[in-house]
Each structure stands twice: as C-alpha cells, then as structure tokens.
Amino acid sequence: MTMFQNLHRSLGRGQTLKLQCEACDHRATLSAQEAAALCGADATPMDIRRRARCKACGVEGRVRVWI
C-alpha cells in the first residue's frame, strides 16, 4: 500500500509550510494549524500548489511549496 505525503503526515508541531509565488517571488509562511485549516489535513503538495493564489499579484497555481 502506497501512502502519499499530505499535510497531516508531513508537518509536525512547530513546523511551517512555506510558499513562494513563481510569478513575483512573494513568500508566505503558514503554521501547521493554519495550513490544515486552509487546505485540509489530507491535502497533498500538488493540491496546495494547484489551489494556492498569491496575495501580492493574484496569480493562481504557480507556487513553490516546501516545509
């Protein structure tokens, strides 16, 4: 059985999810609780990348995601 990485498995207490817009280089950081509340605990990196919208320039789906 293959287990895909998701927010619940990847982010531990005290860790943050980092996002960077590929269009304007705006960066944002979300705590594990904020990320789970916004995206859902089962969200995969591709789910987050596809749904994210930059608050600076408004571009959607062009985000780099890492922990």
Image (cartoon, rainbow, N blue to C red):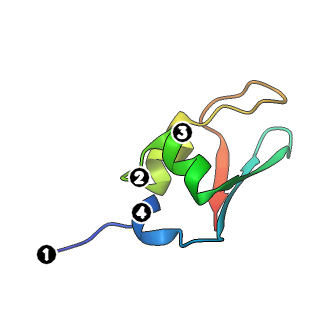
Q: Is residue 39 above or below residue 66?
A: above
The type of residue carrying mark 4 is: His
Callout 3 secondary element: helix
Question: Can I make out residue 6 in this image?
Answer: no
| Label located before the other in sequence (4 or 1) | 1
User: Which structural element holds mark 4?
Assistant: helix
Secondary structure type for disc 2: loop
Q: Marks 3 and 4, Cα distance to the nearest angstrom?
A: 13 Å
Quarter-of-image position of residue 59: top right
Q: Residue at x 74, y 33 (%)?
A: 54
Point 57% across, 53% down: residue: 33
Q: Which mark is residue 41?
A: 2
Q: Quarter of the image holding residue 3?
A: bottom left
Label 2 vs 4, first from the N-terminus: 4
* Residue under label 1: 1
User: Is residue 6 found left or right of 24 in the rendered image?
Assistant: left
The Cα atoms of the two marked residues, 2 and 1, are separated by 20 Å
Q: Is label 2 or label 1 in front? A: 2
Q: Could you tell me the amino acid type at mark 2? A: Ala
First in sequence: mark 1 vs mark 3: 1
Asked whether disc 1 touches disc 3, contact meaning CB atoms under 8 Å apart, the reply is: no
Mark 3 or mark 4: whose residue is earlier in sequence? 4
Above or below, 61 relative to 49: above
Q: Which mark is residue 8?
A: 4
The spot of residue 26 in percent (x, y) is 85, 43
At horizontal 13% and vertical 75% (from top left) the residue drawn is 1
Give the mark toward the camera: 4 or 1: 4
x 44%, y 45%: residue: 47
Q: Are marks 4 and 1 in contact (CB under 8 Å)?
A: no
Residues at circles 3 and 4 in contact by the CB criterion of under 8 Å: no
Instruction: Assess whether mark 4 and mark 2 are in contact (beta carbons under 8 angstroms).
Output: yes
Indicate the amino acid at tag 3: Leu
